[in-house]
Structure formats: C-alpha cells, structure tokens
Image (cartoon, grey):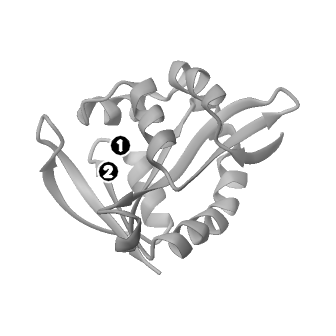
Amino acid sequence: MKRIIVPLHSDHLPYLAQEMSEEDRAECAAMGLGPLRALTLGFDRSVVAWCALKVPEHRPLCAFGCMPLEGILSGKGSPWFLSTPELRKYAVRFLKDCDEYLGRMLDICPVLVEMVDVRHLRGIKWVKWLGFRLTGPESWGPFGMPFYRAEKKK
C-alpha cells in the first residue's frame, strides 16, 4: 500500500466520520461528540492537522492534529487522532511516521496533554508507544467517564 500524509482538508471529514473506528466513536461519545462534530472541532481548532490517504484511491485513513490549550502562547497543546479501521492494515508503516509529526506538534506546543478513554486500548498503547506519561484515571467529559491523562514534554 502506498499512502501519503497531506494537510487535513474539510473534504476529508465526511468520509472519516462515516468510516470512523468503533473505539474512536465510543471515545467521541464519551466526550459528548458525534464523529463529524469531533473531526470538525479538530479541523477548526488545530494549529496543525493532517490526513493519511491511501493512494491511488486518495481514501482517508485517519486524521490527526494539535489544538492549542489556554491559547497558542501557553505552549500547551492537545493532540488528537481519529481513524478508520482500515488504518490497522498499515499500522506499522504509519507508526514509523509518528515521530516526525509528533515532533512538529512539540515544536509548536512543547507540552502536549491528551485525554484517553480507559476503554480505548489501542489508543492507550499508541500514546504509551509515543512516550506519553499516563496518569489517572479521572472523571472527564460531560458524562464523567474515566479517562487517562496523557502528557509529553519536548
């Protein structure tokens, strides 16, 4: 499979929302968001955001980015990542690219803080693999669901 990573575009959002993985859907729901709303918020609020596309079809596999916390000048950001189940077929190749994009996020926001639903086992493994430190769980979101706080500093 050949894939490319491009800047996220609003045209990518409907397909990603329709095809979003069940784990990501459940995490969005725990935050009180539907798939399209979660993607739209990420797209609208991020200082950087990308989409991995399968080529030659140019089919979106995932979207990810970083939203500033407490304003862009705070140095804190919240990374986010939402994917389709198809990305799992290419997970090893995608993981190899994560350091580059995580580095770009850390250049903009030297402190990254993410909340991860305790039920999202793949998400927990991913943030640990990226070197985030997990604490918690703690009640978070509109329903007080248990989430881990994941933090990484440059």
- Give above or below for 134 relative to 95: below
The local secondary structure at tag 2 comes to strand
Camera-side residue of 148 and 4 = 4
Q: Are marks 1 and 2 in contact (CB under 8 Å)?
A: yes
Amino acid type, label 2 = Val
Q: Residues within 10 Å of mark 2 (few under 14, many from 20)?
A: many
Nearer the camera: disc 1 or disc 2: 2
| 138 lies left or right of 52 | left
Give the labeled residue for mark 2: 116
Q: Position of residue 28 (x, y in %)?
A: 34, 33
Q: Position of residue 1 (x, y in %)?
A: 84, 39
Q: Position of residue 39 (x, y in %)?
A: 47, 34
How far apart are labels 1 and 2 at the CA level? 7 Å
| 49 lies left or right of 147 | right
Query: Image point 44% across, 60% down: which residue?
Result: 127
In the rendered picture of this protein, how many numbered marks are placed on residues?
2
Q: Residues within 10 Å of mark 1 (few under 14, many from 20)?
A: some
The local secondary structure at tag 1 comes to loop
